[in-house]
């Protein structure tokens, strides 16, 4: 059973991409915390919003990642112009 976390930023994707270029240490720290925990990452956008969808094998893996990277994620959102809003979802087989 897997879990996904949706993270919504109320900002254009270009602002987050600029934050990644301007502050590589922040995104690098987030990626380091994701290693061995995050199974996949996909990004979606529309005018004024960006949504990241991250997959984890377990709720525990997500919680460990969030504990380690939480402050960096907050900084990432701040430098990109938005407060990240995340929601964890449990996958159910049909």
Image (cartoon, rainbow, N blue to C red):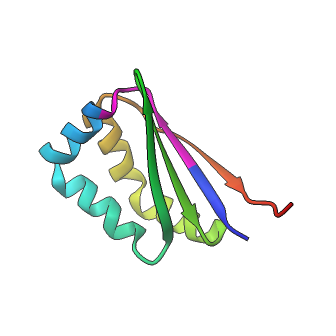
Residue range corresponding to the magenta coloring: 6-13
| Corner quadrant of residue 46 | top left
Q: Point out the image quarter for the N terminus.
A: bottom right
Percent coordinates x, y for residue 54 in the rendering: 52, 56
Q: Is residue 64 above or below residue 75?
A: below
Residue extending farthest to the bottom is: 36
Q: Residue at x 13, y 43 (%)?
A: 22
Residue extending farthest to the top is: 47
64 and 27: which one is in front?
27
Residue extending farthest to the left is: 22
| Corner quadrant of residue 81 | top left
78 and 88: which one is in front?
88
Q: Is residue 9 magenta?
A: yes
Q: Is residue 20 above or below residue 90?
A: above
Q: Is residue 37 above or below residue 24?
A: below
Percent coordinates x, y for residue 25 in the rendering: 18, 57
Residue extending farthest to the right is: 94
Left or right: residue 92 versus residue 18 is: right
Percent coordinates x, y for residue 85 in the rendering: 52, 37
Q: Is residue 56 magenta?
A: no
Q: Residue at x 69, y 52 (%)?
A: 89
| Corner quadrant of residue 34 | bottom left
The number of numbered discs placed on residues in the rendered structure image is 0
Q: Residue at x 38, y 68 (%)?
A: 33
Percent coordinates x, y for residue 15 in the rendering: 26, 31
Q: Point out the image quarter for the C terminus.
A: bottom right
């Amino acid at each position: 059973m897997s879990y996904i976390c949706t993270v919504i930023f109320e900002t254009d994707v270009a602002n987050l991409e600029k934050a990644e270029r301007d502050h590589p240490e922040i995104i690098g720290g987030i990626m380091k915390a994701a290693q061995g925990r995050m199974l996949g990452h996909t990004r979606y956008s529309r005018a004024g919003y960006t949504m990241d969808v991250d997959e984890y094998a377990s709720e525990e893996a997500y919680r460990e990642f969030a504990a380690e990277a939480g402050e960096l994620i907050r900084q990432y959102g701040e430098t990109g112009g938005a407060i990240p809003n995340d929601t964890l979802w449990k996958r159910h087989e049909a």
